[in-house]
Amino acid sequence: MRFMLPTHRRARLLVLPMVALILSACSSTSGSPPNVLSSGGPGSIGSAPPSPAGSRPSSPAIVTITEPAPNAVIAGSTAHVVLTLANATIVPATSTNLRPDQGHLHLYVDGVLVSMNYGLVQDLPVHPGTYSLKAEFVAADHAPFDPRVWSPQIVFTVK
């Protein structure tokens, strides 16, 4: 199954993950490698390599995907995604002044980062098939908290 976004969004999505990786590498306090999305193979969502003690804050945030519902079957070419965020707020600006209760949301489809969202609602273009969806609340510098703040993964099907 192939997940396609409009050309202008694909171009933006190619640049944004690189910015996040660069910011992550710049925020490191030792010679450790930058955070990566996966330790389980290409395209999978895994944990970041261990970071030096105290280098990343933890967060009390809880992120949940409320739409689509787990195992939902939807029709059409758009998946309406709704998230909830508890114990934290989304900030519109990228910053290196990190607070555990402020940050951004990253949305992953089939283990691939497709959105760096400043809100809780988004429509994603989809084609028929089955998708896994997961969201992560990240710090204001777009790098993960330690431990990472993931939503439970949901699976939905487009008919």
Image (spheres, rainbow, N blue to C red):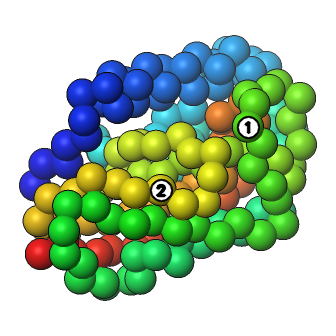
Residue 128 drawn at (x, y percent): 11, 65
- Disc 1 versus disc 2: distance between alpha carbons? 16 Å
For residue 154, side relative to residue 60 (left or right):
left
The residue drawn where x is 46% and y is 43% is 115
Give residue 81's quadrant in the image. bottom left
Residue 47 drawn at (x, y percent): 53, 49
Examine the rendered structure and indicate whether residue 134 appears above or below residue 97: below
Examine the rendered structure and indicate whether residue 23 appears above or below residue 62: above
Amino acid of disc 2 = Gln
Q: Which residue is mark 2?
A: 122
Numbered disc 2: secondary structure: strand
Marker disc for residue 92? 1
Q: How many marks?
A: 2
* Viewer can see residue 59: no
Examine the rendered structure and indicate whether residue 157 appears above or below residue 141: below
Residue 64 drawn at (x, y percent): 59, 72
Examine the rendered structure and indicate whether residue 152 appears above or below residue 60: below
Categorize mark 1 by other alpha carbons within 10 Å: few (<14), some (14-19), many (20+): few
For residue 120, side relative to residue 96 (left or right):
left
Amino acid of disc 1 = Pro
Marker disc for residue 32? none
The residue drawn where x is 65% and y is 20% is 23
The residue drawn where x is 41% and y is 82% is 69
Q: Are marks 1 and 2 in contact (CB under 8 Å)?
A: no
